[in-house]
Amino acid sequence: MAVCASACAPDTAAPACTSTSLSTCLSPTQTDAAYIDQGERYFDTLDASADPASGPTYSELVARWEWPPWLLLTGYGRDLTIAVDAVVLAVYPTTTVPERDCRAFGVQPFARCRVTMDFDGQPCPIYEEFTFNDPGEVTFVEAWSDQPGLLPGADTDTWAEGADVARLSTRIPGLGNATGLIDPESDAMTDVAASDADVAEFVRHTEDFWGTWTEAYDAAGDDLYARGCGW
């Protein structure tokens, strides 16, 4: 069940968030509708039938991480993320996102969506989460193939609310400050990366975006969409 982002906020004062805090330090500052709208606008950028002027409000240093079989870091920084999505839509010009269910939550990630993308008549179910800073900008996007065994938690955990959920967004230092700006070279990031292989891999990809993207693409193989979409 979705948790409302405003009325259900805790009564106690939130702890002071620092430059290296985790995303879960932040509490919602926007309405449920605003968070849901950002999720919808994100999928508009991947939908050839949507308004081309519609898009989410990204933070300057937004990052997008897409778990295997997808290609891990597929966006880093506002301009690059927008450019990558424009290329994807140009390569797959008939892509649409006809089925969308976006909801707001009282804990990060504040917006979560289950959608089905359509590639030339072939459906591709995706689960995606959106982390926000205090101004309501998207700071981190995290995606999974909506296939058995590939989701962040149990297949029956529809909105990834269980204690066993494994998401990257809540483990990256800096996403929990007011601006959500991270520093991959910070001492805090280095310390976390030393004991968290996923964070270490994220940092590696930020250091060489195109090199690691090419590496992930080559490793994915020709059956990338067959595995990711369940074809």
Image (tube, rainbow, N blue to C red):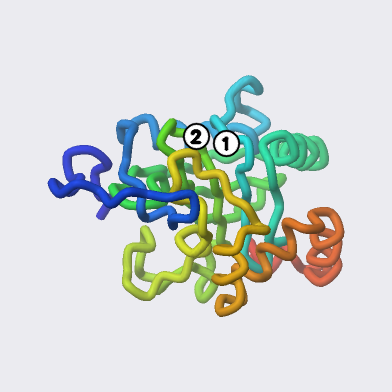
Q: Which residue appears at 36% of the width and 58% of the height?
A: 159
- The residue that disc 1 covers is 59
The quadrant where residue 220 appears = bottom right
Q: What element carries label 2?
A: loop
In this picture, residue 84 sits left or right of residue 106: right
> Where is the N terminus found, in terms of image quarters?
bottom left
Q: Up-down: is 157 above or below 21?
A: below
Q: Up-down: is 180 above or below 209?
A: above
Q: Which residue appears at 72% of the width and 34% of the height?
A: 79
| Percent of width and height locating residue 81 | 70, 41
Q: Do the residues labelled 1 and 2 touch (CB within 8 Å)?
A: yes
In this picture, residue 91 sits left or right of residue 28: right
Q: Which residue appears at 69% of the width and 57% of the height?
A: 73
Q: Can residue 199 be seen in this view?
A: yes
Mark 1 surroundings within 10 Å by alpha-carbon count, few (fewer than 14), some (14 through 19), many (20 or more): many
Type of amino acid under label 2: Glu
In this picture, residue 101 sits left or right of residue 105: right
Viewer-nearest residue: 194 or 92: 194
Mark 2 surroundings within 10 Å by alpha-carbon count, few (fewer than 14), some (14 through 19), many (20 or more): many
| Percent of width and height locating residue 217 | 81, 63
Viewer-nearest residue: 144 or 28: 28
The tag earlier along the polypeptide, 1 or 2, is 1
Q: Up-down: is 3 above or below 208?
A: above
Q: Which residue appears at 49% of the width and 39% of the height?
A: 179
**Marking on residue 138:** none
Gap between marks 1 and 2, in whole Å? 5 Å
Q: Up-down: is 124 above or below 132?
A: below
Viewer-nearest residue: 44 or 117: 44
- The residue that disc 2 covers is 137
